Image: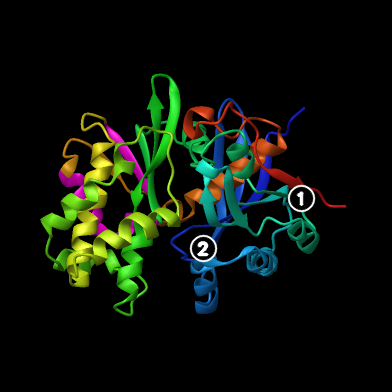
Amino acid sequence: MFKENYNVIGVMSGTSLDGVDLAYINFEKKEHWSFKILFSETVPYTTDWVNKLKNGFYLNENELISLNESYTGLLATIILEFIEKYSLVKIDAICSHGHTILHQPENGFTLQIGNLPKLGSLLNYPIVCDFRVQDVLLGGQGAPLVPIGDQLLFSNYDYCLNLGGFSNISFEYYGKRIAYDISPVNTVLNYYVNQLGLDYDDKGKIAKSGLLDSNLFEKLNLISFYKEPFPKSLGMEFVHKCIFPIIENFSLPIETILRTFVEHIAFQIAQNCNNNSKTILITGGGAYHEFLIERIQYYLPNVLLVVPDNQLIEFKEALIFGFLGVLKLRNENNTLASVTGAAQDHCSGVIYNVN
């Protein structure tokens, strides 16, 4: 007999390197699933950790093992401080995504650091983690994993669009949930804003001040990934290999790069949405980029773009990884083959129980 109520901590670190998102959530299962985010917080990375994670892409095997060990320790410290800060007592599980360093599903490989058994021994709570590896071994992309949560928790929206390090979208397609990555977002925007000495472009003001370079815009839109059928997913490898070389070839002012890349993001999102649909739920850090939202609306004039409250914008992924963990505890499918391209729907993740 399954429980009706679960209290879990969802933990997420995304490619935009904003920090570690933590959410303490109550999930309730009656006729349908419902949730309440009771406490939430983002713990920013130190500059040292931002650099370590940013450069993880270049490390050799031994260096990655060392990074994985130290990052697992960091995560444990952050989670314990969160538990202590909010005096959390009822915890059925800690459900952690870890941080993606390498993502090469075409080679049967993906690596999220911070998912070592050490996490369980350091925290002394049941841990559910490492959600992507099994899917890749089953021939899937290992991403995106959020759509099962979109389907079961946010079914009242036609599309669920996340604007994080990358944009990804989820929707019903001929009776099945599908989802895939669309394009880079903050992985590129923040990279260039950082060169101005800023962490991010507040509300997109700098991008809005720039000029649209039509040649760069056209060149970006010709990238072959955008023509590929789903399922498909993106990692930092794509940004380094396909995006940065094109942009750098143009020798443009940063304001122009930002303006043009925002247009590129909005255009690609519109190519993947039906302008006759009713609603799109927009979450992720990019939801605060007012100029980007404005450009998406330009390309989708008939669609209601729903930007929810700050808590859901910032913690939807932590919420859903908490939910994936609950489904794993119940031994229910939490990964959809229609989304990832795996051989079958399956119950993904690893459980470390308290000894």
Q: Residue at x 61, y 33 (%)?
A: 138
- Residue at left offset 48%, top offset 27%: 338
* In the rendered image, the vertical position of residue 168 relative to residue 172, given as above or below: below
Where does label 1 land, which residue?
A: 126
In the rendered structure, the answer to whether residue 150 lies left or right of residue 97 reads: left
Where residue 176 sits: x, y (%)?
45, 23
144 left or right of 2 in image: left
Q: Is residue 7 left or right of residue 291?
A: right
Q: Quadrant of residue 49?
A: bottom right
Say if 49 sits above or below 94 in the image: below
Q: Is residue 324 visible?
A: yes
Q: Magenta stretch containing residue 287, yes or no?
A: yes
Stretch of the chain drawn in magenta: 278-298
The secondary structure making up most of the magenta span is: helix
Which residue is denoted by mark 2 in the rendering? Answer: 57
Of callouts 2 and 1, the N-terminal one? 2
The mark lying in front, picked from 2 and 1, is 2
Say which element carries label 1: loop
Q: Quadrant of residue 241 in the image?
A: bottom left
Q: Is residue 14 above or below residue 26?
A: below
| Helix, strand or loop status at disc 2 | helix
The spot of residue 267 in percent (x, y) is 21, 45
Residue type at tag 1:
Pro
Which amino acid is tagged 2? Phe
